[in-house]
Amino acid sequence: MKPDTKEIVLENITLIPELFGSQDLNLKLIEKKFNVRITTRENHIRLKGDPKDIETVEKLFKQLEKL
């Protein structure tokens, strides 16, 4: 089955360093835990993987952005 792709945009770009972590460590942990591929460019995040996993990770980023 071909993986799905979704792009999300973070509204608050000042939170990006905290969200992504030092050397993108947080992104790597999320990729491993949820079995998705994450690529970023500024405040744009592209998620690639199973649709359920993508939905979960999207909700996670939206919740983290609200903190």
Image (cartoon, rainbow, N blue to C red):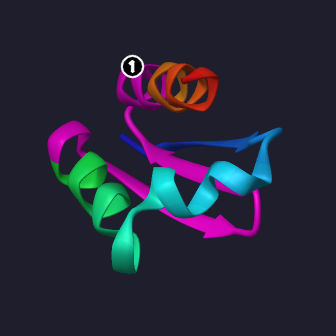
Q: Residue at horizontal 39%, vertical 19%?
A: 52
Number of labels in the image equals 1
Give whichever of 7, 65 is nearer the camera.
Answer: 65
Q: Residue at horizontal 21%, vertical 54%?
A: 29
Residue 54 percent location from the top left of the image: 46, 31
Seen as rendered, the residue at the extreme bottom is: 23
**Quarter residue 25 falls in:** bottom left
Give whichever of 24, 45 is nearer the camera.
Answer: 24
**Quarter residue 37 falls in:** bottom left
- Up-down relation of residue 42 to residue 1 (above or below): below
Q: Residue at horizontal 41%, vertical 21%?
A: 56
- Up-down relation of residue 1 to residue 37 (above or below): above
Q: Quadrant of the C terminus?
A: top right
- Up-down relation of residue 67 to residue 19 (above or below): above
- Up-down relation of residue 27 to residue 4 (above or below): below
- Are there few (<14), some (14-19), or many (20+) residues within 10 Å of tag 1? few
| Amino acid type, label 1 | Lys
- Disc 1 target residue: 52
Q: Is residue 46 left or right of residue 64?
A: right
Residue 57 percent location from the top left of the image: 43, 31
**Quarter residue 44 falls in:** bottom right
What range of the chain is rendered magenta?
33-57
Q: Quadrant of the N terminus?
A: top left
Q: Is residue 46 magenta?
A: yes
Q: Is residue 5 left or right of residue 30?
A: right
Q: Is residue 12 magenta?
A: no
Where disc 1 sits, the SS reads helix
Give whichever of 43, 54 is nearer the camera.
Answer: 43
Q: Residue at horizontal 64%, vertical 50%?
A: 15
